[in-house]
Amino acid sequence: MGKTAVKICGLTSVGMIESMINLPIDYIGFVFAKSRRQVSPCQAGEMLGILGRWDASPPQSVGVFVDPDLEQLERTLGEAPLDCVQLHGRETPEFCRLVRDQFNVRVFKVFSVSADDAGTGGHRELEPFRGRIDGVFLDTCDPVLEGGTGRTFAWEKISEYHRQTQSMGIPLFVAGGLNADNVGELITAYHPEGVDVSSGVETEGVKDIQKIRSFLERVKTHE
């Protein structure tokens, strides 16, 4: 079992990123879709300027979008030069390929998994994306919200998706309801290449540096 990558998503202020300098975080996420954590490209650009202050390798920057068009991506990336684009809507495999080719970014695709559905077969939706994306994120399905539900999904489904991502040669990240109390169980049982947390390291809707530190410690203990 190797290192488990950690993504802290939904950053909204320069001050919060400054408090995280030199913590062992692999990815930092900015939400450009409609959300209480939504930021503008200008705000994200300001926050990206802090990443250069890491002593070692800084976190990779990820922009979270829901069904964007190429014009929106071009505007956003013009002000906030992201490393990765995370697509959280109904984007097609061809659109994912276009984003990779046109903007020279890594593309992560999010797939929603039901909170109570432990059946099989959902992993088949990954196959059309083979060779067109750089990573898969599993998140909790919600009929209204595209993400950020703060709820876990049926983890029993992780293994079937993981077999598929391994055959595709890309990492699998798990999101949805993770926190310091349950991330160790997830890593021990399912060994994803990465974990993605947002509300699980917040207090009253604001990122909590102590919760972030606790989350990171649990990941390092169990990986």
Image (cartoon, rainbow, N blue to C red):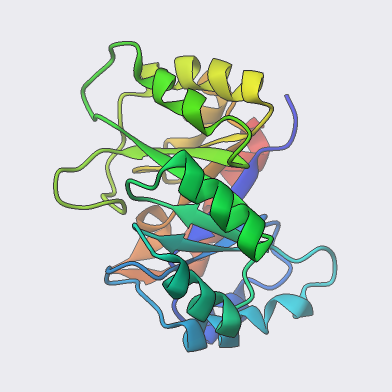
Residue drawn at x 54%, y 58% as measured from the top left: 85
Q: Is residue 27 above or below residue 153?
A: below
Q: Is residue 197 left or right of residue 57?
A: left
Q: Is residue 101 above or below residue 169?
A: below
Q: Residue furthest right?
A: 56
Instruction: Say which quarter of the image contains residue 3.
Output: top right
Instruction: Say which quarter of the image contains residue 33.
Output: bottom left
Q: Is residue 205 left or right of residue 10?
A: left
Residue drawn at x 24%, y 29% as measured from the top left: 114
Please say whether residue 174 is visible from this viewpoint: no
Could you tell me residue 88's position as x and y percent? 38, 51
Give the camera-side residue of 19 and 159. Answer: 159
Could you tell me residue 159's position as x and y percent? 49, 16
Could you tell me residue 192's position as x and y percent? 58, 30
Quadrant, the C terminus? top right
Q: Is residue 89 left or right of residue 135?
A: left
Instruction: Say which quarter of the image contains residue 124.
Output: top left
Please say whether residue 221 is visible from this viewpoint: yes
Give the camera-side residue of 111 and 216. Answer: 111
Residue drawn at x 73%, y 24% as measured from the top left: 1
Q: Is residue 186 above or below residue 164?
A: below
Could you tell me residue 43's position as x and y percent? 49, 86
Q: Is residue 185 left or right of residue 206?
A: right
Q: Residue furthest top?
A: 120
- Count of numbered labels shown in the rendering: 0
Give the camera-side residue of 74 and 89. Answer: 74
Residue drawn at x 74%, y 68% as measured from the top left: 22
